[in-house]
Amino acid sequence: MFSSFRHETGQRVPDVFDEMLRRCRAGEAVALATVVATWRSAPQPAGATMLVAADGTVTGSVSGGCVEADLYERARHVLDTGTPELTRYGVSDDDAYAVGLTCGGVLDVFVERVEPAALTQVDAVADARRAGRPAAVVTCVAADAADPPGAGPADPAGRLGRRLVLTGDQVIGSLGADRLDAAAKADALGLLAAGHSGMLRYGYHGQRRGGGLSLFVAAHATAPRMIVFGAIDFAAAVARIGAFLGYRVTVCDARPVFATTRRFPEADEVVVRWPHRYLRDELDAGRVDGRTVVCVLTHDPKFDVPLLELALRHRLAYVGAMGSRRTHDERHKRLREAGLSAEQLARLASPIGLDLGGRTPEETAVSVAAQIVAGRWGGTGHPLAALSGPIHHPA
């Protein structure tokens, strides 16, 4: 299902997709294991992958070590037989040698053999990746008894392992029925627009209320954006950690002497523009969405007030602004005078970041990144030792 390019989180499993592409182009089959569902404190999100080649080489991980040994043997078996498998890994039982997740989570992992014949599909995803376009791969990971129950054997049409690849206007492959393809395409594009991977259930002929088929949608969304306004030392550190987290980073400042690629080598682009004008153009062009994070580090009213007024009127993932508490109070006053509601002002993280006690630009960048991550996953920012319940929040 080729879900190793980018997860909806923006994270990338190192080299799994590249390795699969390289092996397919060399005429080699590989076994690809993909996390298709998680519950409770699962260590990896849906979409995490591990690849096993015929020579025994392993690339990637699905659990951080909990189940990889068992999964390796399953992958070798699937590579030999060509028959896909869907396996559930759960909490270890009383048997000290049992395979399970000691963290208390549950994973469903689909293992499939990817043949060199699938190169057309893999290449289509690779082309979308290079062009920065989103793509979705829909794979049938479970095929139960035909509809209605008892009408026939499980997977009578051989749907298990079939794929549908969606890249822009291009559709490659089939899940075995036109109606099923149409339903899966529509729903997969919805997931892709939101940047999420996930499971879909249909009847064998595409009935949305039916049962029988479980399809996993691997959403290869483009990287979410981080726009850093203010070309200062703190911006350089925030840009570095933003790139590390998988964001496509833009640094914008109206002053050309400061906004240079030499000062911000980790940024994907450095723009010399008046900040609010740049953001307005990006919004109008549809290049900013609900996954975008905005960090305003200018702490200069003539820059940040019109910029924040614009940013807070849109549902962005995060809007943070640097400054002292006095600056924050004055900024709030000006934004209220500009007509922003209490709900809109509540979206502003100001002063920016979490209280980690940091002082340096790098330490400040860590606190900003921690606040962004906590907001994305619903974290509290409190020490894990002081909390109860699952460590990993569900996706």
Image (cartoon, helix red, strand yellow):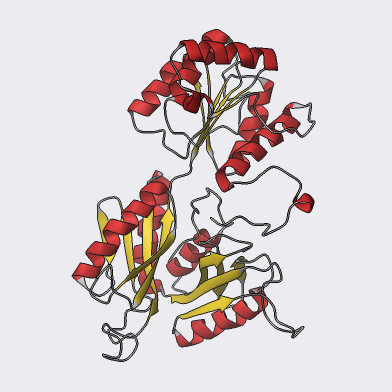
Residue at (55, 12) in percent of width and height: 333
What is the x, y in percent for residue 66?
68, 71
Furthest-top residue in this view? 302
Q: In the displayed image of the protein, which residue is found farthest to the front?
A: 342
Can see residue 134?
no
Count of numbered marks: 0
Q: Quick check: 101 above or below 222? A: below
Residue sitting nearer the eye, 271 or 324: 324
Q: Residue furthest left?
A: 178
Quarter of the image for residue 96 reads bottom right
Picture residue at 67% right of the left edge, 80% below the top = 99
**In the rendered image of this protein, does residue 219 appear above or below residue 106?**
above
> In the figure, 108 relative to 319: above or below?
below
Position in image of residue 224 (x %, y %): 48, 41
- Location of residue 329 by image quarter: top right
Which of 313/162 is in front? 313
Frontmost residue, 108 versus 13:
108
Q: Is residue 224 left or right of residue 322?
A: left
Is residue 331 found left or right of 184 in the rendered image?
right
Q: Is residue 135 visible?
A: yes
Q: Nearer the viewer, residue 99 or 11?
A: 99
Q: Residue 361 at what x, y percent from top left?
A: 73, 27
On-image quarter of the N terminus: bottom left
Q: Residue at x 60, y 66 (%)?
A: 62
Percent position of residue 309, x then y: 46, 18
Q: Is residue 41 left or right of residue 20?
A: right
Position of 58 with respect to 93 (left or right) is left
